[in-house]
Image (tube, rainbow, N blue to C red):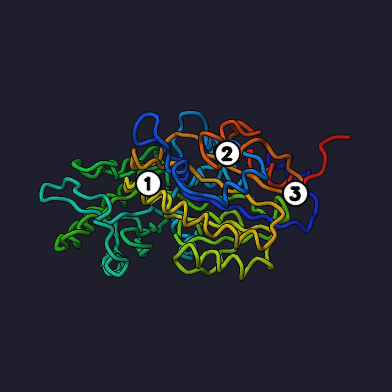
Amino acid sequence: MDLELLKSLVVPAESKILLLVMDGLGGAPRQPGGPTELEAARTPNLDGLAARGVCGMLEIVGPGITPGSGPGHLALFGYDPLVHRIGRGVLEALGIGMELAPVDVAARGNFCTVDPAGRIVDRRAGRIPTSVCEEMAARLDGMQVPGATCIVRPVREHRFVVVFRGEGLGDALSETDPQRVGAEPMPVRALTSAAEATARAANAFVAEARRRLQDQPAANMVLLRGFASHPALPTFKDLYGLNAGAIAVYPMYRGLARLAGMAPLPTGPSVAEEFDALASHWAAYDFIYLHVKRTDTTGEDGTFEAKVAAIEEVDAQVPRALGLNPDVIVVTGDHSTPSALKGHSWHPVPFLLCARSCRPDAVQHFAEKTCVAGQYGRLRGPDLLPLILANAERLTKYGA
């Protein structure tokens, strides 16, 4: 959908929209013929919504393409992730409230563990406590490397942000994370001539970081990915006239929301506290995006039962959302994270949309096996938002 065309169809309305994103919602069977995590979960409230609404499956980017969290969310927010490419470094930086200058290049960092030979033992340093992350980030902050000053801020657990600030920097860079244990971190490579100075700066930062962290038992090295400069993205207010808010615990998702023009809303870390925040802020916003992370982390950890429990935890909170009387409620994920694969996958993601004006289909249980037979079949991720707006009676007709 062309964003300018969509913008031309927008009309004012009083309707209220809730987009509930269960990160990594889609799953896969542990053994052939078995259930996915969502199919195995007891979800009476989500099933009730599915029975009153319409369902389908989202190809977030395209068939066979495994989306990252950034492209996945951009698609759910209506932006084509093949057109709007945003590196994770910017999202992490904005998510923790950093202000980026035009000359900055931001990267998302992991503290990791390497053995004496420099091979990666743990890509997440055992998910060190955030307090340790803060100490290690302070060791690296303010580092001077050729062509740049390095601003380092802790994010959460093993994650941090590094911003390279200097003139003439480019963000077309390769990543250092080989995405597997037993391998050495890779050097940063410039993918264009304009990024060569930044590649030198990033490699100098990594080398010095290893020296400064060498006494640590776990967080003794860094991995960098998602190099990016601040992009220009049309906002929900500009495009759709929506006063939008976002409830998310993890900084990257708050960063995504900020890029889309949503106001990050304060919340506690638990799912129940996120729904507390929803109730507290519901009256002030036309559109609220609520993000749940645990469905993704349990999938990445490979714990089928824990992912089932995470889905059931969200289901138990759904009546609280319904009590707010949203005109449109949508439940989906930004990608699939099957516990059997311990990572993101290409599998389509189920979605349900419940609104006063929708024509219910035959789906009675919210799960992959049933949603694939729903009214909407398979859609590309960016096609979901026009459906949300239409069901919220915020789009007029196209043409005479």
Reading the image, the residue beneath label 1 is 299
- Marks 2 and 3, how far apart at CA: 22 Å
Nearer the observer, 29 or 266: 29
Give SS at disc 2: helix
> Percent position (x, y) of residue 386?
69, 42
What residue do we see at 30% from left, 70% from top?
A: 131
Return the residue at label 3: 356
Residue wearing tag 2: 381
Q: Residues within 10 Å of mark 1 (few under 14, many from 20)?
A: many
Indicate left or right for 297 with 144 as reference. Answer: right
Whether label 2 touches label 1, CB < 8 Å = no
Q: Residue furthest left?
A: 116
Of tags 3 and 1, the one toward the viewer is: 3
In the rendering, at what x and y percent does residue 375 appear? Answer: 66, 33
Q: Amino acid at mark 3?
A: Arg
Q: Secondary structure at mark 1?
A: helix
- The image quadrant that residue 83 belongs to is top right
Question: Is residue 387 visible in this depiction of the protein?
Answer: yes
The earlier-in-sequence mark between 2 and 3 is 3
